[in-house]
Amino acid sequence: MQLAQRMSRLGSETAFEVLARAKALEAQGKEVIHLEIGEPDFDTPAHVVEAAVQALHNGQTHYTPAAGLPTVRQAIAEHISRSRGIEVQAEQVVVTPGAKPIMFFTILALLEPGDEAIYPDPGFPIYQSMINFVGAKPMPLPLREEKGFRFDPNEFLDLISDRTRLIILNSPQNPTGGVLTRQDLETVAKAARERNIMVLSDEVYEQILYEGEHVSIASLPEMQSHTILLDGFSKTYAMTGWRLGYGVMPTALAEQVTKLMVNSNSCTAAFTQLAGIAALTGPQDDTQTMVAAFRERRDVIVAGLNQIPGFRCAQPAGAFYAFPNVEDTGMSSKALADYLLEEAGVAVLSGDGFGRHGQGYIRFSYANSVENIQRALGRIEQAVAKRR
């Protein structure tokens, strides 16, 4: 069998590769503490589950419109209008099975071979993977530790060219936990308006924020017509396995993204969409409890990592990831991540799996209990001590 050449340009997510290795070790009897997967360790709120169960009992098991059920699109439009302070219509919303298709469809719809797309580095690896897949040129925007894992405005402006067709933002950010400021967003918005460039704003961690308020670039003057806002239910409502996400974008683009839905997934499952309405409009206590727990875990893991020789960890302002600098351990990111899994039984991710500028860092997901985080820190400290 001969594969299409484009398949060689697709990347992957190291989180799933490391998870598979960790599971193999567990099958051999080794205990592993999982700090690799970016998945809330909380149950989906009970009222959301009940809404899905009721939908199933009511026969909501058939095709839906490709862009989503009208009631769901309207609920999302109202939610985004409230949470981002902008006016959104249901026609601007496309519901997808998970948020990731919005990345895929946006890049397919907007980029031609030879076009350039700016994306955060370190950043979610699917950005670069999909830019490469369509034959466009990835333009990594370094996120600097000394700037709280924000970008340097001059470095950003230097990347803009006549070939720039898309700018990808992610705030709060995976893998660093960094958060962009309004000033950062204004720098991007000015360039986007002047050059007529579209912005894909990945805001899936919008509600997992520990200080201040979330600012969406879509809320800045004249930016709704230049923004595709990506969001979903996986992180905020512990619904990773439900596969429910959405994009909010100019209506003309929403129509094209809907065509891509027709040609790929047909539609998103009806009962999961109806559960999404319950998530958005029902009690938010579970989300608030989860974020409070993440804040406590953040404080524990950051303090603990900073006590380990060779580790230097900035305090993340959002999401549920710590991204310590480990250069002073004398090991590469990949070597250290492998060593911690094999020697300490702690599964983490190498920073270079998130881009070239992630080299020298390790990503920890603190979506685990305080007890397990403390046990992991003790194991890491012992393992590192053996190498010194």
Image: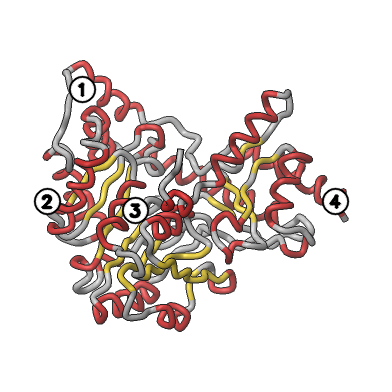
Q: Nearer the viewer, mark 4 or mark 3?
A: 3
Nearer-N-terminus badge (2/1): 1
- The residue that mark 2 highlights is 91
Nearer-N-terminus badge (2/3): 2
Residue 204 versus residue 159 in the image, above or below: above
Q: Nearer the viewer, mark 2 or mark 3?
A: 3
Side of 66 relative to 186 (left or right) = left
* Percent position of residue 31, x then y: 71, 29
Q: Which quadrant holds residue 127?
A: bottom left
Other residues around mark 2 within 10 Å, as few (<14) / some (14–19) / many (≥20) = some
- The residue that mark 4 highlights is 385
Which element type, helix, strand or loop, lies under badge 2? helix
- The residue that mark 1 highlights is 61
Nearer-N-terminus badge (2/4): 2
Residue in view at x 50 percent, y 35 percent: 41
Of the pair 317 and 88, the residue shown nearer to us: 88
Q: Which quadrant holds residue 314?
A: bottom right
